[in-house]
Amino acid sequence: NTTFHGNHYMVTGIIGFLSSIVDNVPLVAGCMGMYPIQATGDMAVNGIFWQLLGYCAGVGGSMLIIGSAAGVVVMGLEKITFGWYMKHVSWIAFLGYIAGIASYWCMRTFLM
């Protein structure tokens, strides 16, 4: 992770945005190959990178209706259009996504 100089928030944030377009399961599986799991530190199994990746990939998929299997099913069942979702829901999902990352940062910075 030398490109972002250990800024796990930036890396996982970008991956979260990608998960709104690409299914999050193969995206996280790809990250498991790109970023090695270490015994200790940020890249440990319970380290900051993997916790943030789980959050960002999961919640990031809700920013667009096509980013999750549930969104695609709702599109079909409820006849919700992509444009309607963008106008009424995406901005709320984006705010929640950013608030979650900010909350995680505050907990890691001030409580741990």
Image (cartoon, helix red, strand yellow):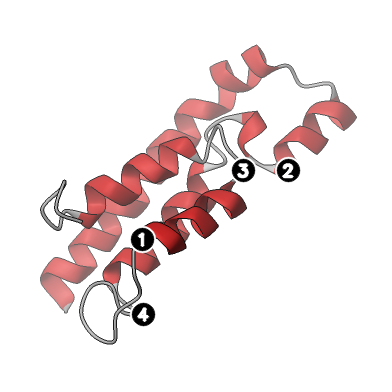
Residue 14 coordinates in the image, percent (x, y): 34, 40
Q: Earlier in the sequence, mark 3 or mark 4?
A: 3
Q: Secondary structure at mark 1?
A: helix
Q: Which residue is mark 2?
A: 69
Task: Measure the C-alpha gap from mark 2 to mark 4.
Answer: 27 Å
Q: Secondary structure at mark 2?
A: helix
Q: Amino acid at mark 4?
A: Asn
Task: Measure the C-alpha gap from mark 3 to mark 1.
Answer: 17 Å
Residue shown at 84%/21% (left/top)? 79
Task: Measure the C-alpha gap from mark 4 to mark 1.
Answer: 10 Å
Q: Specify the quadrant that holds the C terminus.
A: bottom left
| Label annotation for residue 46 | 4
Residue at the extreme right? 77
Q: Specify the quadrant that holds the N terminus.
A: bottom left
Which label sits in the foreground, 2 or 3? 3
Q: Is residue 22 left or right of residue 102?
A: right
Q: Earlier in the sequence, mark 2 or mark 3?
A: 3
Q: Which residue is mark 1?
A: 52
Q: Amino acid at mark 1?
A: Leu
In this rendered view, identify the residue nearer to me: 87 or 32. 32
Residue at the extreme front? 33
Q: Amino acid at mark 3?
A: Asp
| Label annotation for residue 23 | 3
Residue 98 coordinates in the image, percent (x, y): 33, 43
| Cβ atoms at labels 2 and 3 below 8 Å apart | yes
